[in-house]
Amino acid sequence: MFEKRFYGEGLPGIKIETLKGLLIVIEGSDGSGRSTQIELLKDWLEHRGHSIIDVGLNRSVLVSQELSQAKETNILSPRTLSLFYATDFADQLENKIIPSLQAGSIVLADRYIYTPMARDIVRGAEREWVEAVYSIALVPDAVFYLSVSPRNLAERTFNKIQFLDYWESGMDMHLSLDWYTCFIRYQRLLQQEFRRMSARYGFKMVDGNRPVSSLNKELRHELERIIEHFQVPEKV
């Protein structure tokens, strides 16, 4: 079997040897196809007999509603927004991710700590402070970052919802008065930070500009290898 570990001291009272499942993270900006791949992988793994739990940003019972409401006002400071997301993550880690891994499930994370960390850092937060905030996090068994060009991200977003999101465009950073230009510049900053983080945290960079089926085929192949290596049993 494999050995789990936390980035820092982790959550108190957790016996690492009890975490028998897998934590698989799919990272990428809005429009990268991340959520689509999560759903396809979830269906595929469930048909193979695995118990699947999915988690993601802003889904905690504790603060998700309040976080969504606060973001609508566009008045949160970068530090406050960072702590909001950290609280959301901590609640899911303690009450959903850890118990699911203890039960032997495969946890599919539709983004993890890396997106809020990258967002914080490009907004000027101290890297050491950000890493300390998220040091409670469990190290995933695999992280896949779907890399998509900023222009493709913008095009996919327009095709899906016909407008650009204030926060995903980095409008709070005042990179440009034009939303599209601001979006492109902000996404480039995020991607630069993710490339730096990939070396530190061991991401697998995946070309997300490809068709959905081609990307899913590669991710399935990677997960088959991981499941076989870690000997995760199917549920009976």
Image (tube, grey):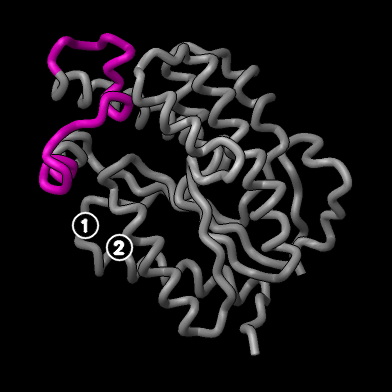
- Up-down relation of residue 107 to residue 59 (above or below): below
Instruction: Tell me the tag on residue 215.
Output: 2
Q: Residue at x 43, y 24 (%)?
A: 70
Q: Is residue 211 left or right of residue 206?
A: left
Instruction: Indicate yes or no whether the magenta region holds residue 59.
Output: no
Position of residue 206 measured from the top left corner of the image (x, y, whole percent): 36, 52
Residue 192: quarter of image:
top left
Position of residue 120 measured from the top left corner of the image (x, y, whole percent): 48, 21
Q: Residue at x 64, y 84 (%)?
A: 235
Identify which amino acid the numbered label 2 is placed on: Leu
Residue 2: quarter of image:
bottom right
Judging depth in this view, the residue of 62 and 57 nearest the camera is 62
- Up-down relation of residue 131 to residue 141 (above or below): above
Instruction: Indicate yes or no whether the magenta region holds residue 174.
Output: yes
Instruction: Tell me the tag on residue 210.
Output: 1
Q: In the orientation shown, which residue stands out farthest toward the bottom?
A: 236
Judging depth in this view, the residue of 109 and 225 nearest the camera is 109
**For the magenta stretch, what is the residue range?**
155-178
Identify which amino acid the numbered label 1 is placed on: Arg
Q: What is the CA distance from the residue labelled 1 to the residue labelled 2?
A: 6 Å
Position of residue 198 measured from the top left corner of the image (x, y, whole percent): 49, 39
Q: Tell me whether circle 1 and circle 2 mark residues in contact (CB < 8 Å).
A: yes
Mark 1: secondary structure: loop
